[in-house]
Image (cartoon, rainbow, N blue to C red):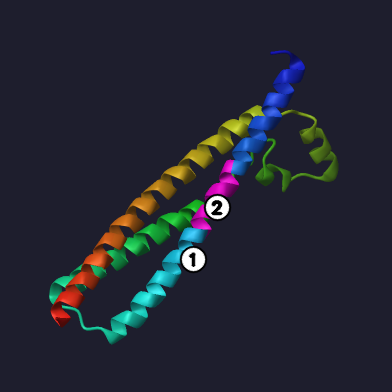
Amino acid sequence: MNGHDTEAALSAAFAEVQGQIARTDTKASILLATIGATVAVLGTAGAAVTLPVAGGIAAGAGAALLMAAAALLLAVIRPRLLPAAPGTLAHWATLTPSELRDDLAVDTRAAAVCALSRIAVAKYRALQRAIDLIRAAGALLALAALLAIGAAL
């Protein structure tokens, strides 16, 4: 690659990794809102429905899995400030305007892409785990509903 191609590739990689991080945050926010709505419905239904013991256990386990998923999703959207290394937001916050100009004169995109890629992968892994927990919670909550219906018949 010539210098121009490398510059373009670095810029594209930097934009891509920033986009991936933004997507994980959006997905996590949507899933958190869904969990919040589900917990609200469960709270309302729980007050109105008497479950058999097995149904109560399934519902409780499902709710616990939803809370675990919510904790993982909160970890996804929690800001991750890199150490105050040159080229990072935390570093720039400590600089004067003239120091910032000097710092920006150095191309740190390659290091930033590597660091941000690690953050993006960690966020995607947490999203995967949260989705797995939500799916398991859904199965347990469906079982609780079936047990409640069976007990009512």
**Residue 147 percent across, percent down from the top left:** 17, 72
Q: Which quadrant would the C terminus be assigned to in this image?
A: bottom left
Mark 2 belongs to which amino acid? Asp
Query: Is residue 78 among the parts visible in the rendering?
Result: no
Specify few, some or many for label 2: CA neighbours under 10 Å numbering under 14, 14-19, or 20 or more.
many
Q: In which quadrant will I find the N terminus?
A: top right
**Residue 10 is drawn in which quadrant?**
top right
Question: In the image, residue 42 lies at what x, y percent?
Answer: 34, 75
Q: Please indicate, yes or no, whether residue 153 appears anywhere in the rendered image.
A: yes
Q: Residue at x 20, y 76 (%)?
A: 149
Q: Residue at x 56, y 48 (%)?
A: 23
- The image shows residue 106, relative to residue 48, as above or below, that is above
SS majority, magenta: helix
Q: Which mark is residue 6?
A: none
Residue 27 horizontal side relative to residue 42, left or right = right
**Which residue is the site of mark 1?**
33
Say which amino acid is labelled 1: Ala
Q: Nearer the viewer, residue 142 or 68?
A: 142
40 with respect to 7 (left or right): left
Q: Which residue is mark 2?
A: 25
Between 75 and 36, the one lying in front of the other is: 36
Q: Is residue 25 magenta?
A: yes
Extent of the magenta region: 20-29
Image quarter of residue 43: bottom left
